Image (tube, rainbow, N blue to C red):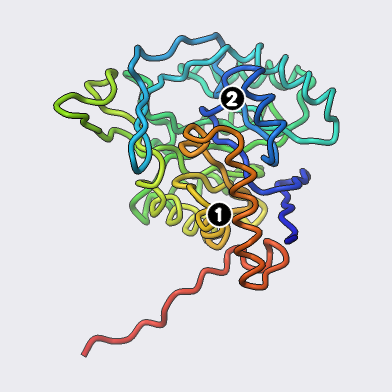
Amino acid sequence: MADLTTTIGDFHFENTVMNGAGVWCFDRDELSAVDSSAAATFVTKTATLQARQGNPEPRMAATSLGSINSMGLPNKGLDYYLGVLAEFENTHPDKPYFLSTTGTDPDDFGRLFTKIAQSNFHGLVELNLSCPNVVGKPQIAYDFGAVERILTQVTGIYHGALGVKLPPYFDLVHFQEIAAVLNKFPLVFVNTINSVGNGLVIKDETAAIAPKGGLGGIGGGYIKPMALANVRTLRQLLNPSIRIIGTGGVQNGRDVFELILCGADMVGVATQLGKEGPKVFARLTQELNDLMDEKGYRRLSDFRGKLQVPEAVAVR
């Protein structure tokens, strides 16, 4: 068997695949199912200060190539997830876990991270700056000034392992601008990408989901090229100490391999996890292992970030 272990900051993981925040992580039962699977760890649902019902249904639909959703951050509130995490950390003291959180108001961030700092949680915190599906709220991570202000506030309060979840970027200047901001802070990871916002899926003559006039975040196989590009480009621009969780479009072990090839240290699975359930992690792990054996790679560092680009040939 190949060595699939990896590290983020000072944390060691026995595998490289995990869930993406939003899927199989709403409550203790779902988190327990992921924890008992072949996944390296889990991340919680993105927690807000208070519990949220989210957007009206239907708000998620699977498609042949992926999914569309406009969930609206349904969750049980920060206190609930801190309590559940305390249980898991007590049972598995050597296993690191991720807490996902975000604010829906500028005043939320200080209160969120004050609570987290005062808790006994000693894992990794993922600050979600990229939810595209809260009606009336912009994606924070497209406002680079807002990102800097929030991270300045948060890092002044919280001194544990911190990372951010990002939306997809499409313009090279935007990659440079977000990297310049993130490199100012002691982040240990970024998670890229969240779903691609404001897509539309039609079934017969009706939009597949109800919120936002049918618009929602697109996930699954549709977005793999964007995920690869974001992982690759950010790996080239971010401080080496900032590790990358590559998320988006993972359907098989080859997809996991390609995200690592572009520079990912861990790989998140969302849409395919929703379709298959936690058993997907054993399949992905085995397929990745088989591919590494076929290529003669014994550990992830043998190929991580080593994507080759064809030599350019001048047009005549």
Instruction: Identify the residue shown where x is 42% and y is 31%.
Output: 140
Tell me where residue 149 appears, x and y as whole percent.
51, 31
Q: On the picture, is 264 further left or further right than 62?
A: right
Q: Secondary structure at mark 1?
A: helix
Q: Amino acid at mark 1?
A: Gly
- Quadrant location of the C terminus? bottom left
**Image height check: is 12 above or below 96?**
below
Q: Residue furthest bottom?
A: 316
- Viewer-side residue, 159 vs 232: 232
Identify the residue shown where x is 65% and y is 36%.
Answer: 162
Say the numbered circle drawn on residue 109: none
Residue assigned mark 2: 25
Mark toward the start of the polypeptide (2 vs 1)? 2
Answer with left or right where residue 117 lies relative to residue 242: right
Q: Mark 2 to mark 1: distance in Å? A: 22 Å
Name the one closer to the observer, 244 or 30. Answer: 30
Crowding near the residue tagged with mark 2, few <14, some 14–19, many ≥20 C-alpha atoms within 10 Å: many
Q: What is the x, y in percent for residue 194?
A: 45, 38
Residue 237, visible in the rendered structure = no
> Relative to 176, is 92 above or below?
above
Q: Amino acid at mark 2?
A: Cys
Which residue corresponds to mark 1? 253
Q: With respect to residue 200, does 244 lie above or below?
A: below
**SS of the residue at dot 2?**
loop
Front residue of 114/131: it is 131
Instruction: Locate the N terminus by quadrant.
Output: bottom right
Percent across and percent down for residue 232 are 49, 59
- Name the image quarter holding residue 214: top left
Is residue 206 something one can see in this rendering? yes
Q: Nearer the viewer, residue 148 or 117?
A: 117
Pair 2/1: label in front: 1
Residue under the point 42% across and 78% down: 310
